[in-house]
Image (cartoon, grey):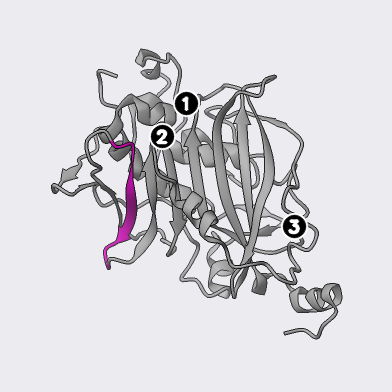
């Protein structure tokens, strides 16, 4: 691509490429699932011990796109991969900064992190493109072993290997992306941290693909669009949050107003003191074929405290006294 996709100012300190400080917008205050508001609602988040409604993790992926393009050029849009463990929530009004380690010449993978002004890490992981030799951050995480899920309640009816039927999805400019994402691409582009002419209907036809590119952060929205319609039998209502996420382009970019098909599979289940976690791989294909164009791995962690009958159902299912 002769013309750079972004005008983002990038600092090169010799070791890292560093993006500017940004204040992402929180657009999910009205998100609804299981007929209730989510962790992105201030009151709900505060009741569960958070400062306020959290900014959804993949919103931060936009800030890494200019850094990925600087390292790998067009390959970033065709086979870019971000793989991240979310470490601390960010809230509207806070400034965050994307940092990517400069890899050796010819290397196709590197480390990433995002920090707040107080140096707290929002996320840590890897960025890569096709031909990377090492595992991604989440591939390492899965290979090292996850804390086992024992005596589940919220995930009592789910098992590893469970799959959903194939669903067709698309993203148009003015299409509201459902109860999970109560906004349109056009509204997102009005506040996105890293705008690009590739995302603009009037200019994108000048790119080598001739179509409008879906921003990296909005791939998560597209892939989750039907998640509540064809989802797994997770008990609720319970509040969930993204704990780990990897998005990999295989035959990218993905385009606005194009049809895709996807299917989901449970690939792992795990637990922490506060959560039961469902690890789902979403494979995205061209309609009527098995050609995979993108893959997302998502750890959706359900908060035990948000599920009212948690202790009672856990005891009933597994035959022991509530904890």
Residue 256 position (above or below residue 132): above
* Label 3 – label 2 distance at C-alpha: 31 Å
Residue 247, percent across and down? 49, 41
Q: Which mark is residue 10?
A: none
> In front here: 65 or 80?
80
SS type, badge 2: loop
SS type, badge 1: loop
* Label 3 – label 1 distance at C-alpha: 31 Å
Label 2 close to label 1 by CB (< 8 Å): yes
- Left of 165 or right of it: where is 51? left
Q: Residue at x 72, y 85 (%)?
A: 323
* Label 2 – label 1 distance at C-alpha: 8 Å
Q: Which mark is residue 234?
A: 3
Residue 304, percent across and down? 66, 71
Magenta portion: prevailing SS class: strand
Quarter where residue 221 is shown: top right
Q: Upstream in the sequence, badge 2 or badge 1?
A: 2
Residue 137 position (above or below residue 67): below
> In front here: 192 or 110?
110
Image quarter where the N terminus lies is top left
Residue 92 position (above or below residue 27): below
Using a 10 Å C-alpha cutoff, classify the residue at mark 1 as few (fewer than 14 neighbours), some (14 to 19) or many (20 or more).
Answer: some
Q: Which residue is mark 2?
A: 80
Q: Which residue is mark 1?
A: 252
SS type, badge 3: loop
What stretch of residues is rendered in magenta?
A: 107-118
């Amino acid at each position: 691509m002769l013309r750079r996709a972004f005008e983002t100012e990038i600092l090169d300190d010799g070791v890292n490429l560093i993006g500017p400080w940004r204040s992402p917008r929180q657009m999910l205050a009205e998100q609804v699932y299981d007929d209730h508001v989510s962790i992105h609602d201030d009151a709900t988040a505060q009741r569960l011990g958070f400062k306020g409604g959290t900014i959804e993790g993949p919103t931060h992926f936009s800030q890494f796109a200019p850094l990925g393009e600087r390292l790998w050029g067009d390959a970033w849009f065709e086979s870019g991969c971000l793989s991240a463990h979310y470490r601390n929530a960010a809230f509207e009004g806070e400034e965050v900064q994307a940092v990517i380690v400069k890899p050796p010449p010819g290397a196709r993978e590197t480390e990433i992190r995002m920090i707040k002004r107080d140096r707290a890490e929002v996320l840590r992981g890897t960025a890569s493109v096709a031909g990377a030799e090492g595992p991604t951050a989440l591939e390492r995480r899965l290979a090292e072993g996850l804390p086992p899920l024992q005596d589940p309640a919220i995930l009592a009816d789910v098992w590893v290997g469970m799959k959903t039927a194939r669903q067709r999805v698309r993203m148009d400019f003015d299409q509201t992306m459902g109860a999970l994402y109560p906004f349109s691409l056009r509204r997102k582009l009005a506040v996105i941290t890293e705008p690009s002419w590739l995302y603009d209907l009037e200019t994108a036809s000048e790119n080598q693909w001739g179509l409008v590119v879906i921003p990296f952060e909005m791939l998560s929205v597209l892939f989750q669009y039907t998640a509540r319609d064809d989802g797994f039998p997770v008990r609720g209502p319970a509040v969930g949050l993204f704990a780990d996420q990897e998005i990999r382009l295989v035959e990218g970019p993905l385009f606005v107003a194009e049809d895709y098909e996807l299917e989901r599979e449970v690939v792992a289940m795990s637990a922490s003191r506060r959560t039961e976690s469902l690890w789902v791989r979403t494979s995205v294909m061209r309609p009527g074929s098995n050609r995979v164009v993108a893959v997302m791995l998502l750890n959706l962690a359900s908060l035990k405290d948000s599920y009212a009958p948690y202790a009672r159902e856990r005891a009933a299912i597994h035959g022991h006294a509530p904890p």
